[in-house]
Each structure stands twice: as C-alpha cells, then as structure tokens.
Image: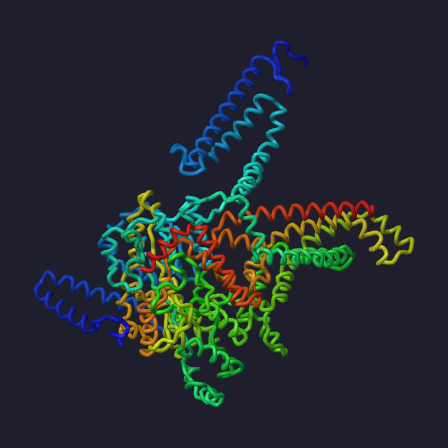
Amino acid sequence: MSHRILRTSVDRRTVLKAATGAAAGFYAWGVPGKSYQRALAQESVIQQILAIPGAGSEPTEADMQRVGELILEPTKANVQPGEFQGQRLTFLGLNNAGKHNLVFRPLLAAWQEYTGAEIEWIDLPQAEIFPRIQQSIASGTVDFDILEGGAPWEGDILGKGLAAPMPDWVAEQIDMSDYVRLLQAPVGTWNGETYRVSIDADAHNFNFRSDIFANEELGAEWTAGGGSQEWGVPQTWQQVQVVTRFLNGKQLDGEDLYGILDVCAPGGGFSWYFFASRATAYAKHPDNKAWLFDPTNMTPYVNNEAFVRAAQDIIDALPYEPADQVNADLNRTGFEQFLAGIGSMVHWWGDVGSFVYTSDLSVVQDKVMFSILPGSDDVYNNTTSAWETLPSGPNFAPNEAYIGWGLYVMQRAVESGVDKAAWSVAAHLGNKDLGTWMAFYPSGFQPYRNSSFAEELWAGAGLPPEFISSYLSSQADSYNHPNGAIEPRIPGIFQYYVAAETELARAFAGEVSAQEALDAAAAAWEQITDDLGRESQIELYNAALG
Amino acid sequence: MQQNPAIELPTADAPIGVTAGWRQTLGRVLIVGASLVAIALVAVQVLRTLGWTTLGFQNWRPVAIAYLAWAVCLCASLVLTRGERGERAVFVLPAVLMTLAFIIFPTIYALFIAFHNWNLSATAGREFTGLENFRRLFGDRGFWAAMQNMVYYVAAVLAQYVIAFGLAILLNQQIRGRKFFRVVFLIPFMLSPVAVSFMIGKSLLNSQYGPVVPALEAIGFTGISFYEDPWLARLNIMIMDAWYSIPFMMVLLLAGIQGIPGEVLESAKIDGASSWQTFRHMIFPLMLPVSLTAIVLRVIFELKLIDVVRVVTGGGPGSATDTVSLFIYREGIQKTNVGYATALSQFYLLVIIISIAIVLWLANKAVQKVS
C-alpha cells in the first residue's frame, strides 16, 4: 500500500531498508554514524509526539506545549539560548474553528522560552484574512513579521516584493526535499528565490459514510428501485446525483439520510473551491492544463458548459439536501453536518478525515472512508467546445484546492532586524515531525511531507489500519494525480473567486439560472482581469501553468 | 479700592500697549510660520505621490502630524492676536478642524477616488477612469437587488413605529411596575446588534443545532428553515432588526407623550372624547414632530443596516437579504476594488441625502398642515 501511496518509482520500504542498512554500516565506521544516531532520535521524537495525546481525544493546550518542547532540538542547532531576548514578532494568521494560530501559540511556548523572543498574535477568520493583507499591502502598512498565507496569494505578496527570501540554514533545518510533489517549486518561489515554509498541503478529497454504502437494506432498496449499478460508493458525479436523490426520505438507525452536502453560501472566496470540486471532472481535460482561463487572452471558461453543468447539478441536488442548505458555508458541511452524522458524502479538505477520531465534534468514528473526488463519464474539451468520452473511462481531476498554507517572513522583519527570529519561528512550525503530528490531530493542516505518509506511524498512534490507508491514499492520490486541477498563483485570484461565488449563490437561491449566474461571473472576471492588467495576468497565468 | 492708573490692563476685545503688540506679532509669526511649513510638507508629499520628486516621506503620517501641529498653532495664534475673542473661537475650532479632517476631507478625497479604477491587486495601481465606475453601477444587478431590499427594510420602519408608539402609550399609563417595564423594554437597545444576531439568528434559529427547530418539530412542523425562503429570511432579518431598534423609537415617543400638557388631555376628557378620539385628534397630531424625528432617524440608521445581515445570512439566500452597505463592504473589502466601492458609497450617500431631504420637506408640510 505504501508504494501506492507515495506513487514513486521506488518502493519506500526498500529505500528505508537500504538507508537503515547503510546507516548501520556507517555507524560501525564511527564518525559518519552520528547522522544515523540523529535519525534514530528523530524517529523517536515523532513516535513520542504522535502519542500525545493519542487517537480518541483532542490535544489540550498542555499537550501542544509538550509537543513544542519535544521538537525544539533543530532550533537549538541554529539559535543560541536567549539569542532573541527583547525581540518582538507579530504573527498574522487564522483562528478558524479554534485551530491554526490557536495551535501555534502553545507549540511556540517552548520556543519563546528558549529564545527569549515574544510573539504578538493577529488572529483572523478565514473570510477576512486576505482582504486584511490586501489592505495592509495597499496602504503600505504591513504590520506583521510572519504571515500564515496561502500559495494562491503568492502573486499578490511575492510578486510585490513584500516577503524575504529564505536563508540557507532554514532550508536545511526544514528539509524541503521531503515535501509532496504538489508543494515543490514553483510553489513557494518567485523569480527563482524560495520564500515559503510549508506547513500544509491542500486538495479536496471525497469523504463518505462507509456504513451507509455497505448497508444491505439500502442496497436491496437500491436494486429494487432499478439502480443502474451495484449499491456502493459513487465513482462519478453523475452517480452522486442519483444516490442523493435515492437517499431522500430514507432513514438509518432512526436518523434521516442525505446524500451530498454542498456549500452554497459565499465565503470570502473559499466557497468557490467547493463549486470547483463539483466542476473539475467536467472542466479539466487531461490534454489541457488550463481549466479556468484561456491562457492566450484570459477569456474565462467559467461560463462554459462544464461549469454550467456543475452549477446545475448543485441546483438539482439542493431539494434533496438538508433544510437550509442554500445558506450552508464550509464549516457547516464539514463540521456541523458530516462529522455530526448528517449527510453521506462531502467534498472537503483533509481536515474532515483528521477530525474523525481526534475531534470532540465527531460522532462518525468507524463510519467514514475516503477517495479522490468523483470523476465524470464525459469531459468538456475547451479547445473543441465539445464533450468527450475518454477511452480510459471516467475523467478524474482532483481539485488541488488552495495548494496549502505556508509561512512567509515579511520584509518588515528584515527592516526591523527580527528576521532571524521570524525565520526560526517558521522553521519551528515547519518542523518535519511536527508536520505529521499536525496532520494527525485537528490543527487545520494536512499531510504535506512524503514522510508523513508512513502508515505505521499513524497506526502506532492508534488509528484503524483501513481508515489510515483510505485517508492517506485519498490525500496522496489527490496531490499526485496526473490530471490534478492546479490553481493559478496569479494576483487577485480571490477576487475572481468572490465574484463567482456571489453570482453562484444567486443561482442556488433560484434568482437566476445557472447559465445566467455564470455568464455574470464571466463578465465580472473579464472586468477583474482588465482592472488588474490583462497582459500581466496572461503572463503570470501561463507561468503558473508551467 | 482705587485702581493704579500707571498699570495698563488689556481689555478683552482690544489688547493695547507694548504687551498686546508683542502678543499680536508673535501670534501672526506663529500662524504664518506654521502655515508655510504645513503647506510645504503637503506640496512636497503631493509631488512625491505624483512621482515628480523623490523628496518627502514614505507615507502621509508626517503630514497628518503637521496638520495637528498647525491646528495647535492656529489656536494659539488666535488667542495671542484676538484675546478673549480668540479664546471663544478656540472652544469651537478643534471641533471644526476635526470635522474638516475626518469628514469633509475624506468625503472630498473619496469623490476623487470614485473617479478612478483602483483595485488593490492591480500592479498598475490607481488609474483615472472618469465616470466609468458610475456607469458600471447602473448595470450592476447585485447593487440594485440590494437597493430593492433597502426599500423593504425602510418600509419596515413604519411597522416599528406603530409598535413603538403602542409601547410608549402603554408605558405612559399608570400601570403596576411601570419603571421596571421601562427598563426591561430598553434592554434590547442596550445589547450589541452583533450579539443579538448571533444569539437569536445564528444560534436559536439555526436549522442544524438551534433549539427552536426541534421544538417546532416536536409539535408537528416539518422541514423548518428560517432562512431558505427569500421572504421568510427577509422577514426574520426585519424582526431581529426591529427587536433592538423599537426601544430607541419607544424612548423618543415616550418622551414626546410625557411632554404633552396634562390640561390638554384633561380638557378632551371633560369634553367627552373617547380614548380613540383623544389619540386620533389630540395625541397623534401633537406627537407628529416627535414621530417624524423618530422615523427619520430610524430611516437613516436603517439605510446603513449591515450588522444583523452580515452575521445571520451574509446577504443570502442569493441576494434576498443583502443590503447596500454589505454590498459595498464586499466590493471594497473582499474584492479589494476600492475605486468602485467608493463610487458606490458616494452614489448611495447622494441617494440618502436626496431621500431624507424629500422626507423632511414632506414632513414639514404635513406638520404645518396639522398645526
């Protein structure tokens, strides 16, 4: 399974065995063996921290402080005790669902004690963080030294020279070669310089209720009702639509059953991703990297037949979804509904999976499994403006939604002489072992390092093997999919998203048709492109496509 | 006691003698010097902003400090040159200068911005586009949907007025616990609208985990959702808005009722007028000026409605509950389209001013007619 997860040409176990044997050999030789001793110590750190507090409970602040202490060794190698005494850093990040900054705080307690630096926190909700940054940039009042930012914003931040390039000692401390393919350059880089310490990788996967799709009574009803294939987990969005209609009015263990859970309310640009996940299998052709704009002139594709079909799917499914779904935001579908046992399918980031056994919100332990996003029986070809059925079968195109959160040190830190402290904070939070811990427990982050996909680490912390395998596969297969729908790192990308989700909300509420809404979105996108400068957007979009 | 004729005492309005002359000169030097420095700083910063020079500051903060310093010098100069008259002016001047700095200047500057395409993500920065933003807003479906909602929300003020008037009359009666009820009815007004919206709209009425839906389901209702239907969502917003707004009108109206001379009502009673006749022909006409003040104030507040909608529905479903302020917030803050958002604000300000002017004119006519 592991080799399937890593999707590399060499078996991971073989590599580990060879490395272990070689290191043992070096150890026998003396001095070079010290690196092996360090490797053993690292292994021991990751095992220790993954056991804090262990599957079945959510980490307390004290747990997180302990984890922060255990991962301090790499910092000690580069920073002297009390080296940053009297320095004050400002850290701007999220406070979603009590995670992100609220996890960083205790994780950095030991770092602060060791280095003597103080950190001032600016906590913002997801829908407000990007506008806040934009205003700071535009008004020349960047008032933070460290930014928790998304890769899609790099056009706005790195393109304007607001961040500082990463020093070599940081790159060495965090081991960037371990990042998953999705996060390798050009992500985090601009004009050949590296700026980002990754702490997360993001792609939408498909979370489903394994108990519902394995239920024999429902299977019998499905067959009796003339279900076109065997009762089971939908593989395509077309099947998702059929299953959603089928489950309407049915119950399991006295609870009403629902099919897919859609995000319909605008959410500062983040709701776009949920619509996009419904659309990528229709809109992202394997022969064409561009799925949002025509790369020659930035003409939007958002009102083509593929996107209209996706919007119409949501409109058609809404009557069968829970009451008031038309006002559902992302927190509702992921946490208030799916983890609370409402709905049988949800497309979301990997947070849902990492919450199943480790969050107090969850009531669906032993009932959830995962896959990459559903595919489509046919795919729209932007070049020929026609639907195609691929000889290889359904078209799968995971939405590499948001690419992932990272930490950026701003030029302001350099100007005020606190840049080394700022980079040390970023490197501490970008710690290799901590990456696995943050993916395992509710933190707001998913696995972003190849080393985090070692199933034995997760099993050691107490999760069921089938669950781990399913979860990690869905993540890795999404990150590494050859037809992944990559998000362009162009300036103003969230303006496009906000415009589209505002228009889509009108279609979901029945004010306009799907085509009318997306035509309006396309017109808004054209306006935004003109506002931002069409020529530069074309250039940056093509650069982002690679 | 006799005054010593050798000592010159400067009078309040006409300082005389050597001391007064010295004071006047100092005052003039002070204001001229401060003005020259302030003008020079503004000029250099403007030239820097236009890209004609590299001199100047990184931002406009030093110019703002220079304005404050100039304001202090102006006040000091007035006192020195005009004596007591200057001191009297100093009581008013800070307020005038603050209004100039925080209301007049931003309004004029906003008008300037409204004629520009200024998207914060644009690499080209701000560009003059003339009336383009205003042309664009006339074709903006979302903006006009929000404007239409504002008509509904403003119309709901009349319902708030009727309820507030009823409560004011009730609280003016000699009823047991009158003082207690007066305080209780004021509590919603004391609460933050955001807190009210969150507690009621987002929590109690939540279709997923709020207690109201299960309670209604327990008595036989099914498929309950307070925000799915556009009109029901709008109505819920209006009710929440009314809940914390009615006390404000009620207090104004209660004060008005208490101001009606007792003998007027007593004479009506002696003449055999019924309660309804007393209200219809005495209280209501006498309360008209207060009523119009209360309504106009509430309309102005209502036109700026954003908090309840932002917290509870975000303007949805679709644009069913959207308000103009929320729409402008989205354009300016979320889409960072500052030029267009500013043009929308300026246009909306114009609409509010014209609407309120018409309402006040009609109100004056009505009051004159009644009186």
Q: How many callouts does the rendering have?
A: 0
Left or right: where does residue A334 sit relative to residue B188? left
B185 shown above or below A315: above
| Residue furthest out toward the right | B271
* Picture layout, residue B224 above or below residue A430: below
Instruction: Point out the residue furthest to the left here.
Output: A29
Q: Nearer the viewer, residue B22 or B326?
A: B326
Q: In the picture provided, is B191 more to the left or to the right than B275?
A: left
Which of the image's four quarters has the C terminus of chain B?
A: top right
Image position, residue A37 (x, y; %) = 16, 64
Q: Is residue A43 visible?
A: yes
Query: What colouring style does the render use?
Result: rainbow
Image location (x, y in percent) of residue B190? 62, 54
Compared to residue A151, the image places residue A371 above or below, namely below
Return the residue found at the far front: A384
Q: Is residue A435 left or right of residue A310?
A: left
Q: Is residue B342 above or below residue A7?
A: above
Residue at x 78% of width, y 47% of height:
B259
Residue B260 drawn at (x, y percent): 80, 48
Give residue A79's position: percent from left, percent from top.
24, 51
Quadrant location of the N terminus of chain B? top right
| Nearer the observer, B328 or A370 | B328
Residue A351 seen in this snapshot: no
Q: Residue at x 92, y 53 (%)?
A: B271
